Image (cartoon, grey):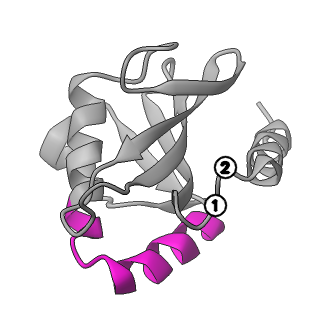
């Protein structure tokens, strides 16, 4: 797991930690070539998460799965370069640790839905961590 936007935790709220998977990093690099304002949109999303963390089925968040206490949610990510189409971001939120791990970023016109294998791999990697 890599640290995403390490300095944003101090910009927005010291309690939150943000991370991302390797696959998310690749998605981000690939899509940043097409959409130059994507890094700014991700920063805005981090700020929005700090102000109002994901809830279980709120208007902005769609819960894909819930394995206590972790919520796997997806959300539409607005981007300046996209008019009507949008990007989707899939993330894992742990309310007990105030942690967010970004799992997947995709354009809706490229993929219809999120990749369930990525979510399974992420959850399996969590079970490998000794407590």
Q: CA distance from mark 2 to mark 1?
A: 7 Å
* Label 2 with label 1: CB-CB less than 8 Å: yes
Image position of 36 (left or right of 24): left
Q: Nearer the viewer, residue 84 or 49?
A: 84
Report if residue 82 lies within the magenta region: no
Which disc is residue 111 wearing? 1
Residue 12 x %, y %? 17, 40
Residue 113 x %, y %? 66, 48
Dominant secondary structure of the magenta stretch?
helix
Look at the image and tell me in which quarter the N terminus lies.
bottom right
Image position of 115 (left or right of 108): right
Look at the image and tell me in which quarter the C terminus lies.
top right
Q: Residues within 10 Å of mark 2 (few under 14, many from 20)?
A: some
Which of the 4 image quadrants contains residue 47? top left
Q: Outermost residue toward the bottom?
A: 33
At x 36% / y 78%, what residue is drawn?
32
Q: Element at badge 2?
A: loop
Q: Outermost residue toward the front?
A: 84
Q: Is residue 84 above or below residue 81?
A: above
The residue tagged 2 is: 114
Q: Is residue 62 above or below residue 111?
A: above
Q: Nearer the viewer, mark 2 or mark 1?
A: 1
**Magenta region:** 22-40
Residue 121 x %, y %? 82, 51
Residue 107 x %, y %? 49, 62
At x 24% / y 60%, what residue is drawn?
83
At x 82% / y 44%, what residue is drawn?
120
Q: Element at badge 1?
A: loop
Q: Is residue 71 above or below residue 87?
A: above
At x 70% / y 15%, what residue is drawn?
68
Q: Residues within 10 Å of mark 1 (few under 14, many from 20)?
A: few
Image position of 21 (left or right of 99): right
């Amino acid at each position: 797991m890599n640290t995403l936007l390490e300095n944003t935790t101090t910009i927005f709220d010291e309690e939150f930690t943000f991370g991302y998977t390797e696959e998310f990093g690749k998605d981000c690099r690939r899509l940043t070539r097409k959409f130059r304002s994507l890094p700014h949109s991700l920063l805005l999303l981090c700020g929005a998460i700090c102000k109002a963390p994901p809830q279980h089925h709120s208007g902005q968040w769609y819960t894909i799965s819930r394995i206590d206490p972790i919520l796997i949610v997806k959300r539409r990510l607005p981007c300046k370069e996209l008019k009507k189409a949008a990007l989707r971001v899939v993330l894992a939120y742990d309310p007990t640790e105030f942690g967010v791990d970004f799992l997947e970023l995709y354009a809706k016109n490229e993929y219809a839905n999120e990749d369930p294998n990525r979510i399974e791999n992420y959850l399996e990697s969590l079970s490998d961590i000794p407590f």
